[in-house]
Amino acid sequence: MKQVLEFEKPLVKTREELDELRRKHNVKPSEKLASQISDLEKKFQRLQEEIYSHLTPWQRVQIARHTQRPYMLDYAKLCFDEFVELHGDRHIGDDNAMPGGFATIGGRRVVLIGQQKGRDTKENLLRNFGSAHPEGYRKALRLMRMAEKFSLPVIAMIDTPGAFPGIGAEERNIAEAIAFNLREMMTISTPMVSVVIGEGGSGGALGIGVTDRVLMMENAYYSVISPEGCAAILWKDRKHAPEAAEALKLSAQHLKELNIIDGIIPEPAGGAHHDHAAAALSLKTGLLAAIDELASLSPKQLLVERYDKFRAFGQFTEAA
């Protein structure tokens, strides 16, 4: 069953009316029905533009979590010419929440890594709801080092509510695995691009996000904490999640203004979940542009600019 968000319901109702008129017109064509269809199509377009041009941060969070939204492996098929998955962290095991391997995009060889969610219970259990274990982050770093060895660009697709907080992950030191990645990604001397394609939750997202260019899909979000988590802390009630989303400045539009990200990938009308092919084409264009821009920089320049980029985050005042 297709997921319908609350603010999308007026569109769904109009689309159903439009489909009904089209069915009637196919059975018994008439000028009157054709005119009604034309008017309703214009109404639908106006309504769609009105809704999606005034989305709140909380509504964008809902779109980012939409179950029909393209996931990492969907983009691997739609954007990339070839993807060969590699497995294992060479320490403990594999992590299905963090697929990665060699790929080609626009004739360029790259290493692709990312977080993968599931659409049903069975797949979500396999992918751990997109929340990686320590071995997932260690596998990601292993593949980044392999990319450096063969002078291949790295593309990281971020889509996670956060790293897995379970007992097993804590026993295998999830915090150290992420912290180690943050440090080591500053030293990898090959072009690296990350893109938040859905949810960008806390250190789980940042663990593969210390890159030369950080991009975001138009309706993705990137935040130190989920709106619900923030609301539970500040207001002691998750119902204040919409206010928390506004306060966190977690949308691509806010983060671009704050220079936290480098670019926004536009999505088709209504969001990526309405048109996977169009979203993939837009993403591919953005990724290729970023890779081409970084190709002119020397390894030393990459490291210096990457370090300076992340050191510049935040605003503060020093007292005299």
Image: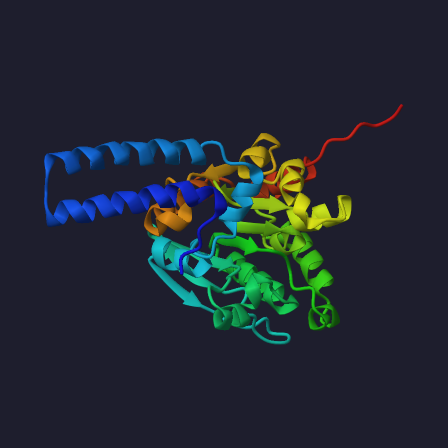
At a point 52% along the width and 72% down the height, the residue shown is 126
Task: Examine the rendered structure and indicate whether residue 162 appears above or below residue 250.
Answer: below
Quadrant position of the C terminus in the picture: top right
Residue 35 shown left or right of residue 275 in the figure: left
The picture places residue 147, in percent across and down from the top left corner, at 50, 58
Question: Which color scheme does this rendered protein use?
Answer: rainbow
Give the residue furthest to the right: 320
Query: Where residue 189 appears, x then y in whole percent?
Result: 57, 50
In the rendered view, tell whether residue 17 sits above or below residue 253: below
The structure residue drawn at horizontal position 33% and vertical position 52%, both measured from the top left corner, is 107
Percent coordinates x, y for residue 10 in the rendering: 41, 41
Residue with the most extreme bottom position:
92
Residue 127, image x, y percentages: 53, 68
The answer to whether one can see residue 243 in this image is yes
Say if residue 187 shows up in the picture.
no
Q: Quadrant of the N terminus?
A: bottom left
Observer-nearest of 18 and 91 = 18
Left or right, 180 with respect to 110, comes to right
Total count of labels: 0
Q: Is residue 128 above or below residue 107?
A: below
In the depicted structure, whether residue 50 falls above or below residue 59: above
Identified at 44% across, 55% down, the residue is 3
Q: Is residue 86 left or right of residue 319?
A: left
**Which residue occupies the extreme top position in the image?**
320
